[in-house]
Image (cartoon, rainbow, N blue to C red):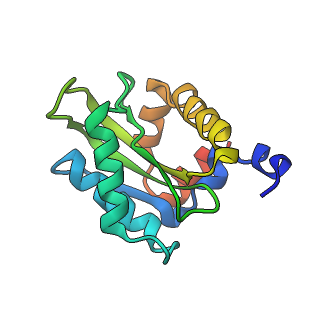
Amino acid sequence: MSTNEQSKISLGSLITPARVLLAEDYPSKKELISALVQVVCRDYKQLDPADVAAQVLKREEGISTTLDTGLSIPHARLEELTDFAAAVAVLRKPLRETSGNELPIRVMFLFLSPAKPAFFQKHLQILSALAEKFKPEFIEELASLSNAEEVALRLAR
């Protein structure tokens, strides 16, 4: 992917309805991360879901990526990827993180990127864009939506 192509990546382009998980609630952050990893790995046969989940969870152990807005952004950089990949979960009932800050999670945006140096700057830009877009009002709006297509369309705006 050229630098010009990388600059065209938007949050909406990362999420299709098939990559949206809507749930009433979830038992734990670890299980939610694992579920989102499974969603992404359906489209990336070169990825081992157990290995990806382990890498994401190891990254989360270092520093939690849950923001006080209700957004959690677990992420990892993977050697096996040649492009960005993501999945999103929208929870009707907040999930309480049990380790560390105990912030409520309403939306989890799992984000995976290639571990190549050419992608690092865009990786940081996407993380920044997520933090900027997912304000409490936007998260509440997503939580009010009834299907994956609506969520994917709202993310594309």
Q: Identify the residue shown where x is 50% and y is 67%.
A: 18
Tell me the quarter of the image containing the C terminus.
Answer: top right
User: Most extreme residue toward the right, as rendered?
Assistant: 4
Residue 25 can be seen, yes or no: no
Q: Position of residue 139 (x, y in %)?
A: 44, 34
Percent x, y of residue 150: 54, 53
State how many labels appear: 0
Quick check: 62 above or below 30? above
Seen at 43% across and 53% down, the residue is 146
Residue at 22% from the left image edge and 50% from the top image edge: 30
For residue 72, side relative to residue 9 (left or right): left
Q: Please tell me which residue lies in front, 143 or 86.
A: 86
| Residue 99 image offset from top left, x and y in percent | 16, 32
Q: Quadrant of residue 105?
A: top left
Residue 107 falls in which quadrant of the image? top left
Q: Residue at x 78, y 47 (%)?
A: 8
Residue at the outermost bottom position = 45
Q: Quadrant of the N terminus?
A: bottom right
Question: Viewer-proximal residue, 16 or 36?
Answer: 36
Q: Nearer the viewer, residue 55 or 26?
A: 55
- In the rendered image, is residue 105 in sight? yes
Query: Horizontal placement of 20 versus 26: left or right?
Result: right
Vertical relation: 149 (above or below) 139: below
Quarter occupied by residue 98: top left
